[in-house]
Amino acid sequence: MLSGFPLEHCRALITGASSGLGAEFARQLAPRADVLVLVARRAEALAAVQAELSAMKANILCCVADLATDAGRNAVTAFLAANSVKPNLLINNAGMGDYGSFASSAAEKTRTQIELNITALTMLTHALLPHLERPAGILNVSSLASTLPMPNLAVYAASKAYVTSFSEALAIELSPENITVSCVCPGPTPTNFSNTAKRTNGSDTNRDGQALLRIPPSQVVREALGALQHGKPCVFPGHGVSIASRVFRMMPRGIMRWLLKRRVRKE
Ligand SMILES: NC(=O)c1ccc[n+]([C@@H]2O[C@H](COP(=O)([O-])OP(=O)(O)OC[C@H]3O[C@@H](n4cnc5c(N)ncnc54)[C@H](OP(=O)(O)O)[C@@H]3O)[C@@H](O)[C@H]2O)c1
């Protein structure tokens, strides 16, 4: 039985903390943490989150880095060493999508997506693991999209399938080392995600049925932190998303493909 990670007095590194779920992780941890290191590319947006939380107990540091590059990932570990921060919690939250067909996608955006959603999450975990003070926690942000193939969001869904699989394997590998690994799989959540995923002059994603699944970032983050605290390897926040995940994972693949083909034809 996994025991879970205690959040009180944690020292957390949060990637993608300049908006959306990452900023919300900072908000909910700030009253309990000793140190928060916020990582993203936009310095002003990070500074705004830092200013918003300045009255809180945690010491909040901002690290500007492009995690889609080796240089940016190395800058994060250098920042921790330069500021003598020894984190015991890593929240791999930064991620992005790309709405539209794979064939028409911009090669550079597809590469960036893989670098950010897969490589950054994996290599940051690898780099920090030896230095995480025990008991430690790793919280990876995956997606409901990890449970099914998604035409017109193909690379994103596949990258999140990687995140869920990787996280569940790590949870087993690392539990004897007193490291709790949890993975959160949100459904549609109102953040900046869609603006980044939309292509210039491109169409929006098919939102049929999404209203039933949508919950606010505050609930996603509350359930994610709860899962980490209780040593739950994977959580699907919200009743609708939780039910949808069970249906998607149990559905015979042939039926799944038939339904997806119909949905794509309707678009
Ligand atoms: N919103 C949803 O419906 C939804 C559903 C399921 C899963 N998720 C997942 O939730 C996570 C957070 O996304 P969100 O919904 O909160 O979207 P968001 O508001 O767009 O936040 C994304 C964050 O990632 C950062 N980021 C993007 N590219 C980066 C890069 N190259 N280097 C460093 N940081 C980078 C962004 O900051 P900068 O632009 O300042 O770099 C921002 O802080 C993602 O992993 C996403 O896949 C979201």
Image (spheres, rainbow, N blue to C red):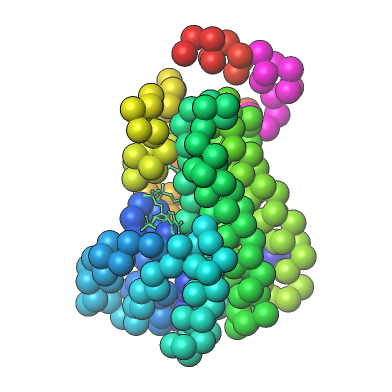
Query: Which quadrant of the figure has residue 36?
Result: bottom left
Given residues 187 and 247, the one toward you in this image is 187
Q: Tell me what residue is drawn at x 33 percent, y 55 percent.
A: 19
Considering the image in quadrants, where does the N terminus appear?
A: bottom right
| Count of numbered marks | 0
Given residues 143 and 62, the one toward you in this image is 62
Residue 125 percent location from the top left of the image = 62, 67
Residue range in magenta is: 248-258
Q: Tell me what residue is drawn at x 63 percent, y 39 percent.
A: 158
Residue 167, above or below 62: above
Q: Which residue lies furthest to the front in this view?
A: 107
Q: Within the magenta stretch, is there residue 176?
A: no
The reply, left or right, for residue 143 in relation to residue 125 is left
Whether residue 185 is visible to the viewer of this picture, yes or no, is: no
Q: Main secondary structure of the magenta part?
A: helix
The reply, left or right, for residue 169 in relation to residue 232 is right
Query: Which quadrant of the figure has residue 212?
Result: top left
Residue 41 percent location from the top left of the image = 38, 62
Q: Tell me what residue is drawn at x 67 percent, y 47 percent.
A: 162
Residue 128, above or below 209: below
Residue 188 percent location from the top left of the image = 43, 37
Residue 223 percent location from the top left of the image = 47, 53
Q: Within the magenta stretch, is there residue 257?
A: yes
